[in-house]
């Protein structure tokens, strides 16, 4: 076990978790993440699995103990509404209220709706090489994994009610029960209402007469066992039941589930075990600062992100301070990539004992096979170059970049991937918003003077080249801010752009002079 102290947030979480144990446990320490298979896995699913994995890795590094990550899918949950983006809307409407594992797959590829979504989740996690154990709620219930916990809940039904009922409105209390029996006649789960508890034989009596929203009921009365998938418990109870049954030691949850976590913690204590250590994280927001839940809005998905930027840049962004809300929109992509590349640049020069506190260490499985990158070429620089010369010739872009940084050959694979992704980003997000403007007479004179001053400069120092526009602005009694804004709008068709010195070194002096000739004669 390491004695070093690390300050990154996963290590702080790992240290909290370590305090739960007096000695090394005889089974792997279990972490859990949850998935609701009513829709496709999304960026929130990805972030929760990634963050939990980072804590897991920090914990393994601290303790050298075996661990396990359980990805739990709540596929016994009922279909509450028809998702608008699904085919076979009528078929799904007919199956409202049934457990997702009993609803037919609208795509016709799997045995059920949830089987399709579960496969998508596993493909999703596998494609990003997460290490996890998948657990279906349906399998857990029907296999009997949860039977012992269910028996305790039934035995302590009055104590459970005393915890949950005060948190509910008066109108909901009368028909509430921790148990949701599956109607033996119509197969629905949200249309049933418990009428009696039989603790002596672990059964409950129910009637299928509750219509919730547009969920139908059939009026059937019955008695059913609470074991082996005949019932499901409600969300807050179900969370506690998993923790109890699988000895979960760590689980994260969004800020909107803090109260649910507190109630579930009380339930699992009532059942005789400690709730897991956990972290409540802030939610993702869209560009306007509104909460993002099942979808990320603006088309920003994991698959689309990796067409515009390396996956590691998204992970780098997600890693930073989970207690801070993060906006997810296309404008964050360039800075996220540049931050990631800066992290790569800095990683190699860190002392080996300090590397585990670096974001890069987490992104590459505890520092395994971290790519070597020591270059000044970043995503913003590539985007600025593409803005100047166009997005159709990769070889030309690479030629300019080699001129700017002669060591680029060492990182050619990384840089070529960045150029390809930057071109996609430029075509879809920068080019449509470009608005070139024609310079007025004074501005033409300023651009001609800029061309003159650059032409007579004989050195190759980026900072000295950068000083030239400031000299021109002073000659024309113009503020540097207004001069650069004019330059970028005329030359790049946008309000911001690269440093002038960087731009000239990228393009080469002859090309820069030719471009200034063109724009000053418009």
Image (tube, grey):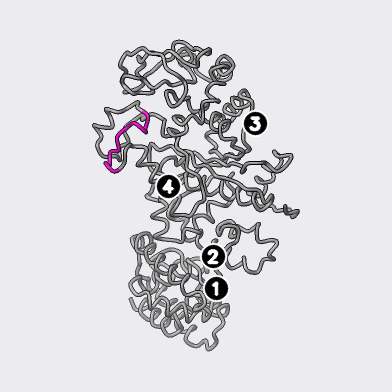
**Quadrant in which the C terminus is drawn:** bottom left
- Location of mark 1 (residue): 375
Give me the residue at 49% from left, 42% from top. 71
Q: CA distance from mark 2 to mark 3?
A: 42 Å
Which residue is the site of mark 4?
122
Looking at the image, tell me whether mark 1 or mark 4 is earlier in sequence order. 4
Label 4 to label 3: alpha-carbon separation: 29 Å
Is residue 422 one of those drawn in magenta? no
Q: Are marks 1 and 2 in contact (CB under 8 Å)?
A: yes
Residue 274 is labelled as 3
SS at badge 3: loop
Callout 2: 10 Å neighbours few (<14), some, many (20+)? many
Label located before the other in sequence (2 or 3): 3
Residue 332, percent from left and from top = 47, 55
Q: Which mark is residue 341?
A: 2
CA–CA distance in space, label 1 to label 3: 49 Å
């Amino acid at each position: 076990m390491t004695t070093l102290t690390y300050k990154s947030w996963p290590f702080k979480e790992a240290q909290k978790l370590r305090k739960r144990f007096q000695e090394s446990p005889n089974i792997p320490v279990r972490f859990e993440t949850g998935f609701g298979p009513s829709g496709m896995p999304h960026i929130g699913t990805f972030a929760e699995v990634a963050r939990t994995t980072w804590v897991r890795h920090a914990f393994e590094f601290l303790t050298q103990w075996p661990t396990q990550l359980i990805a739990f899918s709540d596929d016994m949950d009922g279909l509450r509404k028809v998702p608008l983006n699904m085919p076979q809307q009528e078929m799904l409407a007919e199956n409202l209220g049934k457990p997702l594992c009993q609803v037919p797959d609208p795509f016709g590829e799997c045995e059920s709706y949830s089987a399709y979504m579960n496969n998508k989740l596993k493909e999703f996690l596998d494609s990003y090489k997460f290490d996890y154990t998948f657990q279906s709620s349906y399998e857990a219930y029907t296999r009997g994994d949860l039977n012992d916990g269910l028996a305790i809940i039934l035995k302590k039904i009055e104590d459970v009610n005393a915890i949950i009922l005060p948190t509910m409105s008066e109108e909901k209390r009368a028909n509430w029960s921790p148990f949701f029996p599956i109607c033996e006649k119509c197969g629905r789960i949200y249309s049933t209402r418990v009428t009696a508890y039989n603790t002596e034989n672990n059964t409950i009596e129910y009637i299928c007469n509750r219509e919730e929203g547009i969920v139908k009921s059939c009026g059937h009365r019955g008695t059913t066992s609470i074991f082996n998938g005949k019932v499901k418990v409600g969300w807050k109870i179900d969370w506690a039941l998993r923790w109890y049954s699988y000895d979960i030691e760590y689980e994260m949850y969004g800020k909107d589930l803090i109260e649910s976590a507190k109630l579930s913690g009380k339930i699992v204590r009532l059942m005789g075990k400690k709730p897991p250590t956990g972290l409540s994280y802030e939610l993702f927001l869209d560009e306007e600062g509104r909460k993002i839940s099942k979808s990320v809005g603006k088309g920003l998905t994991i698959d689309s992100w990796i067409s515009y930027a390396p996956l590691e840049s998204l992970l780098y962004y997600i890693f930073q301070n989970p207690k801070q809300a993060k906006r997810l929109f296309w404008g964050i992509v360039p800075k996220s990539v540049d931050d990631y590349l800066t992290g790569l640049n800095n990683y190699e020069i860190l002392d080996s004992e300090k590397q585990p506190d670096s974001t890069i260490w987490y992104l590459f499985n505890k520092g395994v096979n971290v790519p070597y990158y020591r270059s000044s070429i970043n995503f913003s620089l590539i985007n600025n170059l593409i803005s100047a010369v166009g997005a159709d010739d990769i070889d030309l872009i690479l030629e300019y970049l080699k001129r700017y940084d002669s060591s680029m050959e060492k990182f050619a694979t990384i840089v070529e991937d960045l150029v390809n992704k930057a071109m996609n980003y430029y075509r879809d997000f920068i080019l449509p918003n470009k608005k070139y403007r024609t310079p007025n007479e004074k501005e033409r004179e300023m651009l001609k003077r800029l061309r003159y001053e650059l032409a007579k400069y004989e050195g190759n120092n980026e900072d000295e080249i950068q000083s030239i526009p400031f000299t021109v602005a002073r000659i024309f009694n113009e503020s540097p801010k207004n001069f650069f804004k004019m330059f970028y709008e005329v030359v790049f068709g946008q309000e911001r752009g690269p440093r002038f010195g960087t731009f000239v070194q990228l393009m080469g002096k002859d090309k820069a002079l030719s471009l200034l000739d063109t724009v000053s004669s418009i």
